[in-house]
Image (spheres, rainbow, N blue to C red):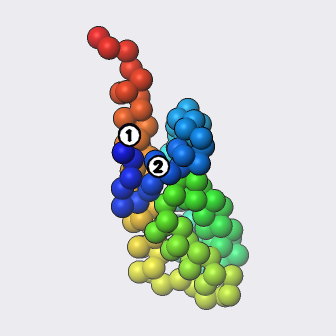
Amino acid sequence: MNHISAHTDLQSSLSDLRGDDAALRLLAAKFIKRYPEKVHLLSSAFREKDLPRFAGHIHRLRGALGIFRAARAQAMAVVLEHKAQSGSSPSDAEFSCFMDELAGVASDLSLYLGSTSERSAPDQ
């Protein structure tokens, strides 16, 4: 398995989980299932300049990004969270870059779930 991309390092995630592929698939599936709602809530808080709510959503996302070793998205989230906590609204460009990176993470996870489904499907 080589699940290292520009957005995630799922090989390291799997190692963190002591090789428990089922656990990683479950975590990935949960992330993907909640992804549209998380994006909506985060985008809404950003548009409304609700910095405490925005910081809270970013903080919760950081945990999930850590699980999937999404280093670039996690680093961006740290910057956005600190800005929001200090009362400074992130720029549109910063937010857009983060959302693009987050979409890349979601794409990696979807591909991973697809590859594990194909791998575990019975031969015909």
Most extreme residue toward the left is 124
Of the pair 46 and 112, the residue shown nearer to us: 112
Structural distance between the alpha carbons of marks 2 and 1: 9 Å
> As drawn, is 93 to the left or to the right of 71?
left
Q: Is residue 44 above or below residue 24?
A: below
Type of the residue with mark 1? Met
Q: Secondary structure at mark 1?
A: loop
Number of the label disc, if any, that sits on residue 114: none
| Residue placed under numbered mark 1 in the picture | 1
Query: Residue 63 at x, y = what percent?
Result: 63, 59
Type of the residue with mark 2? Leu
| Residue placed under numbered mark 2 in the picture | 10
Q: Is residue 91 above or below residue 5?
A: below
Query: Residue 73 at x, y = what percent?
Result: 48, 67
Query: Is any atom of residue 92 visible in this view?
Result: yes
Most extreme residue toward the top is 124
* Residue 122 sits in quarter: top left
Using a 10 Å C-alpha cutoff, classify the residue at mark 2 as few (fewer than 14 neighbours), some (14 to 19) or many (20 or more). many
Name the residue at 46% across, 69% down.
72
- Quarter of the picture containing the N terminus is top left
Decide: marks 2, 1 in contact (CB < 8 A)? yes
Query: Residue 42 at x, y = what percent?
Result: 57, 65
Q: Secondary structure at mark 2?
A: helix
